Image (spheres, grey):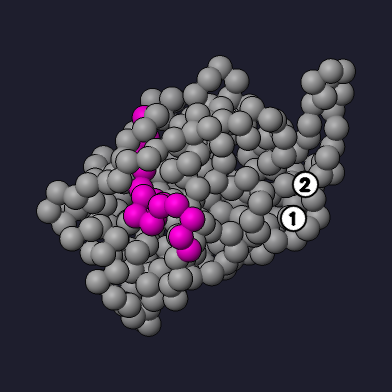
Amino acid sequence: MGLCTKIELMGPQSTQGEQPKLPIPGVKNLIAVGSGKGGVGKTTVSVNLAISLARLGHTVGLLDADVYGPNVPLMMGVRAAPSAIGERIQPIEKNGVRIMSMGFLNPGDKPLVWRGPMLHSVIQQFLRGVDWGELDYLIIDLPPGTGDVQLTLIQTAPLTGAVVVTTPSEVSLEDARKAIHMFLQVRVPILGLVENMSYLECPHCKERIDVFSHGGGKKTAEAMNVHFLGELPLDPAVRIGGDSGSPVTLGNDAAGFTAIAKEVERRATEERGKKGPSIKIED
């Protein structure tokens, strides 16, 4: 029986009532990366953040929770399908990161047509049915918006915090503010806001060009009293790395991702300190 078939046979599960937020066995920090809208580079940030944290010496997992549009396999250069040992799905490891994605189970251009209850089932399967092992960080790449996947994750898993990605344009910032409000309303700490595609440096004259305006991310963070994690440039190398399955953080030019990873590391430590020592749950 294929892995995708096994997940489908689980069927819809009720999302009614309050569910306990049980820790994911072995996972120290559970960090969601979200955005109010698509097209802002949320998956690019998730992938390069995960690799940057791994290069800083941490054990890292990357869960692609964008079920309808899973792009992590392409960006990480992974083509293999995961195996299972007993009831436990084994994540694919690449670039020092353990990865799970619906893109492994539903590859190619075939659309996934599922309603909310099925999304709830698959997210729970990916969180608790995958043999993640011991992880310092599990980065969760959320779909854009504030829908079913976000609610399932927030209601059932104890998030260390969330990273919100935006571009400097007001259209993007308007939706980013909605994402921040969503996390704050459900008491998920905001680790910080990232301004992606902040500027373009002309390759000839080195002049800075503010393609999508500039500075809106920092101003929004200050206005909403959340931490500003930093700016990421509009860099062709980032796009090339994502399209080719060789993320930019694998090379010497980390395009600012290392600095942001260190800030996430620091902010996650602060949030864990506020909550006190965690209880370790064994499999």
Mark 1: which secondary structure?
Answer: helix
User: What's the amino acid at mark 2?
Assistant: Pro
Name the spot of residue 147 as percent of width and height, x first: 54, 69
Q: Can residue 258 be seen in this view?
A: no
Q: Which residue is drawn at 29% across and 53% down?
A: 24
Instruction: Sort mark 2 into few (<14), some (14-19) or many (20+) by Cα contacts within 10 Å.
Output: many
Name the spot of residue 206 as percent of width and height, x first: 83, 19
Looking at the picture, tell me which residue is in the foreground, 118 or 259: 118
User: What's the amino acid at mark 1?
Assistant: Leu
Name the spot of residue 126 as percent of width and height, x first: 32, 56
Instruction: Sort mark 1 into few (<14), some (14-19) or many (20+) by Cα contacts within 10 Å.
Output: many
The residue singled out by tag 1 in the image is 173
Mark 2: which secondary structure?
Answer: loop
Q: In this view, which residue lies farthest toward the front?
A: 109
Q: Can residue 35 be seen in this view?
A: yes
- Eyeballing the image, is 246 above or below 268? above
Looking at the picture, tell me which residue is in the foreground, 19 or 226: 19
- For the magenta stretch, what is the residue range? 96-111
Looking at the picture, tell me which residue is in the foreground, 266 or 171: 171
- Eyeballing the image, is 60 above or below 175? above
